[in-house]
Structures are given as C-alpha cells and as structure tokens.
Amino acid sequence: MPIEGLATQLRKGVIEYCVLAMLRDTPRYGGELIQVLRSQDGLLTSEGTIYPLLSRMRAEGLVDTEWREAPAGSPRRYYRLTKAGQRAVVEFQREWVRFRGTVDVIFGEPGGKQR
Amino acid sequence: MSAPHADQLVHEYLDRLDSLLAGVPQRRREEILDEISKHIAEQRSQIPDESDADLRNLLERIGDPAEVADAARDDGETVTMPKPARRIGPIEVLALVLTPLIWPAGVILLWLSPAWNVRDKLIGMLVPPGGYLFIVFGLPALLVLGPMSECGGGSVNGGPYTQTCTGVMALPVWQQYLIGAAEITVFLLLLMSPILVAIYMTWRLRRWAAEPQG
C-alpha cells in the first residue's frame, strides 16, 4: 500500500472519534471543529469533509444539533454528544489505548516480540 | 468587497457538490450543502479584502466537491445507493430453454442455478421426462400401442354375424368415449405442461433478478 493511502486509511478510522472527543466537554459548530483540526497535522485534509461526517454521526444518533445565534450572519448549527456518542468516545479510548500498546510492542518497544 | 465573479465561483462549487451528492438521502444532502455554504460565507466574511486567489484558496481547503461527496457516501448504511440488480447468466437462460425441451439437461442446470428456490426446482421437474421430445414422438405411439384392442367378427356356420372385441373396444360405447376424452385431456395437459412450467420459471427468474444483490 502506498504510504499516502495508508495515511488516508488510518485517518478514516479515527477522525470520527476525534471529532466526538472534541465535543465531549462543550457543543461546537463545524467551523470551530475545523479550526481545531486544522492545527493537527494530517487529520483533516479536506476541511469540507467534516460536514458529511457530522451529518452521518447525527443520522447514527451519536450527536444532535441545536441552533445558536452567531455574532454576525446566520445562526449556527452546534453539535453536541448524545448518550450514545459519549459511550462511543469511552469505548474508542479504551480500544485505542490497547491497540496502540500492541502496535508499540511489535514495533520494538523494549520486550516487544520483534524478529 | 466581493466581485460578482467570486459569487459565481462559490455558486458553481455548490452546484457541483449538489449534483455529486445524488443518492445521499435528501435530508442529509440539504444539511451538508447548507453547512458548507454557511461555512464558505462565514470564512469569506473574515477576509478583509477578498481576492480571487483568497477565494480559490478557501475552496481548495474545503476540498474537491467529489471528495466531500465521497465522504458522505463512505458509509454504506446511511446512504441509499441502489445496489446492482442480480444478473441472469447463461445457466439460467439454458435452463429455461432446455427444461421444456430436453428434460434431464434442463433440470440439472435448474438445480445448479441459485436463481430458483427448491420449490421452483421441484415444479421444474414436473415437466414430463423427456420434455417435448417425448410428448411429440413417444406419447402418441404409447397411446396407440398401449391398450391393445381389436375386434374381429364373422358368422359361424351361416349363423348371425357376431363381433368380438378385446381391450377398450370390449367396453360399452359411452365408456370408450369417456376414455378417449380422458386421453385427449391428459395429452393436452402434457402438451401444455412444459410451456406452463417455462412461463412459471421465467416469472420466478425475473422476480429473482429484480431483487437487489444480497
């Protein structure tokens, strides 16, 4: 697999949970999420793709939305976690820690089962 | 602040996105378009002196409409893209043609194909063994030769003429008619059964093919 495709695959697997995690403490609107993700290298290559993602997570019941007035312009859709979304974040975190540990071991942490 | 040309660029971008979102459920499609057009408007309002390059930069950061639409389509569950219909292959066609004509070959193909369920396959076997080849050539011969019946007559020693018959011909006339009618009915039924079975198989095949792949 070319390294570029690899990065895409990895990103696809985690971006959803990263967005959910960013909504853990406070509801945010799309532009805000983009701003945070923009500073994290490689997580969001095309910023517009966050909206299909949010819309899908809403359809799946992981987030819901509320309208809030913006300082200027039209009101914004704020996304917040549902109970199911909170559970998904917790489950992902547990799974991620285990997964990362396994990969680290194989990639040569001391005591790893490298060949 | 913004040239009409810039609005045109945005308009074209959203138009393209809209058409690429075909197949995404309507509510989600509207939601995505609405969010992205708001995002563009908001970002543009923060650019003090917008140039064409600024706008192109912004649209580029948002991403190719195809990429955004793909992201909406990534998840099979929430997108209602029609699945390709099942394909009717050579086995199905041959089975349909051969079942009424050459019985064993057609029925074997019938059982090989996933297009018909067990009940359909059993019905397919209702076609008389040998199919039309048997009905057209074999059956009339059987009917004629089958109930060997004959009559012979004559007078003995100048006595009254008597006729003696064996087989069907020995029966009363009305019973002979009854048997004849029954024979014709059975013959016609046998003659029609391959056609009826073929029509039924075709109907089942078309229903199978119309269902999405599963």
Image (tube, rainbow, N blue to C red):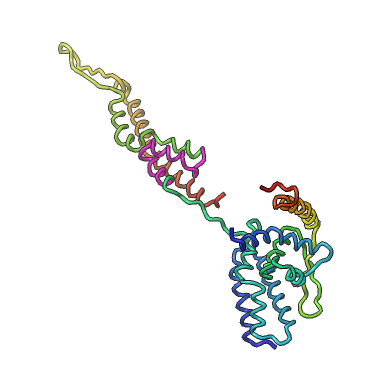
Q: Nearer the viewer, residue B4 or B64?
A: B64
Tell me where residue A89 appears, x and y as whole percent.
78, 56
Q: Is residue B26 magenta?
A: no
Quarter location, residue B165: top left
Q: Going by the picture, which residue comes out furthest to the top?
A: B157
Question: Who is closer to the viewer here, B128 or B23?
Answer: B23
| Residue at 54 percent of width and 51 percent of height | B211
Residue B101 in the image: state x and y as whole percent: 36, 40
The answer to which of B166 and B156 lies nearer the viewer is B166
* Residue at 65 percent of width and 65 percent of height: B26
Identify the residue shown where x is 55% and y is 51%: B213
In which quadrant will I find the N terminus of chain B? bottom right
Image spot of residue A16 (x, y percent) = 72, 61
Decide: is B205 above or below B17.
above
Q: Position of residue B24 (x, y in %)?
A: 63, 63
Question: In the image, is residue B103 part of the stretch drawn in magenta?
Answer: yes
The residue furthest left is B158
Magenta range is B92-118
- Is residue A105 rendered to the left or right of residue B151? right
Assign the magenta stretch its main secondary structure: helix
Among the 4 quarters of the image, the one containing residue B38? bottom right
